[in-house]
Image (cartoon, grey):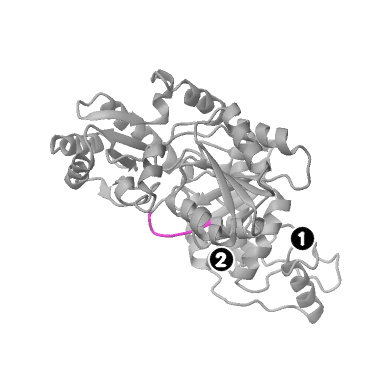
Amino acid sequence: MTDTPEVDLPGAAPRRHPKPRIDKVGGRKLKPSTLMMGHGYDPMLSEGSLKPPIFLTSTFVFPNAAAGKRHFEGVTGKRPGGADGLVYSRFNGPNQEILEDRLGVWEDAEDALTFSSGMSAIATLFLSMVRAGDTIIHSGPLYAATETLIARILGRFGVHFVDFPAGATRAEIDAVMAKANGMGRVALIYLESPANPTNALVDVQAVAAARDAVFGDSPDKPPIAIDNTFLGPLWFQPLQHGADIVVYSLTKYVGGHSDLVAGALLGSKKQIEMIRLMRNTIGTITDPNTAWMLLRSLETLELRMTRAGENAAKVCAFLRNHPKVERVGYLGFLDSTPGDERQADIYKRHEMGPGSTFSLFLKGGERESFAFLDALRIAKLAVSLGGTETLASHPAGMTHLSVPEARKAALGITDNLVRISIGVEDADDLIADFDQALAAI
């Protein structure tokens, strides 16, 4: 939650849960995994409850009329800085604000917002940045719903886009920047890395340098937003490499139990405040119960992601040399895969780990992919990723079915591609499951 003065302003009310400032002990800066246990919450303001209660209320009582007016001046943007207190559950709430504080800790972001889904976060981002006739620059491939939102929905309002492949070089990115700049106002540069579902990496540093070379210090310089769902926040922190806004489907690794849907945006106070005004208007905030569940999940985020990452390394080592596997799109193999030198360079500069979601390319096509998926016994045939259980799906026939065939081919979303998200089961049991499923092809 945002720090606010207790009595500085006439009529201003303190927040229900002012942010405790304990982030150091004996001069040592505490790690995010430690801060997840209490950051942003004071038990003494909730009857000593160790965990934050779920605040199931639609509205909050103002201490006086002047406080109510001041809160609404912040909520509506008439006064910078947002509300000084709790107003109405479409705008803010204790569970959501504690969650947003803790999410910001992982990437040292100035501010954060949570949303009812990953796509509601992305849609609110676009609506707050884009005007009719603007151009969006984006990497490809993107999550299919994001591509649909840009090309089909925003396209109906005269919004254009130009894109470049995830692994593009600086020269290729420069050319796209220049082309977009010649089309009019560039509202946003939107990236996804690793790309869904191919696992291809985007050179965020090169994108930032190309953006700055073309737009300089222009007040209309487009921000760089990036979907960090596949690796964040443990294995990749894009704000350190030139991104301005980080996008999350909290449904995935952060939620981590396949039992909720939510999204988030992190970044500078300036960027987040603009988006907050849009969220206040259209009401895409996450609900208190989901926020509470995410607070629970954040306590084990590092443990879950670490175990899943260790499991993925073992599983991919088995799959790599299997006779029925064409190749494995796993980031941990980039250093030893001929032709992946560009991707390996990006990985060394950006990432802190290979993650636990990868692309498995089987020898064959849709028939072989479906036979493999249907034969799985431990891994579940389901879309999504980042849960405690292992999931497998067929992007070309499922999540990316709506993508035109020509574009799927250009982006490498082929019929023999199976996307796998490794969970926290026993690694040897998973290997046995994949072995018997491959034997069924």
Amino acid under disc 1: Gly
Q: Which residue is mark 2?
A: 284
How many marks on residues? 2
Q: Nearer the viewer, residue 350 or 133?
A: 133
Q: Nearer the viewer, residue 382 or 92?
A: 382
Asked if the magenta segment contains residue 260, the reply would be: yes
Amino acid under disc 2: Thr
Q: Measured from the top left, where is residue 9 in percent x and y?
A: 85, 68
The N terminus sits in image quarter: bottom right
User: What residue lies at 35% left-to-right and 34% top-to-bottom?
Assistant: 312
Q: Measured from the top left, where is residue 75 in percent x and y?
A: 72, 68
In the rendered image, the vertical position of residue 288 relative to residue 143, given as above or below: below
User: What residue lies at 37% left-to-right and 49% top-to-bottom?
Assistant: 400
Q: CA distance from mark 1 to mark 2?
A: 19 Å
Q: Measured from the top left, where is residue 162 in percent x and y?
A: 56, 44
Query: What range is drawn magenta here?
Result: 258-263
Q: Which residue is mark 1?
A: 81
Q: Secondary structure at mark 1?
A: loop
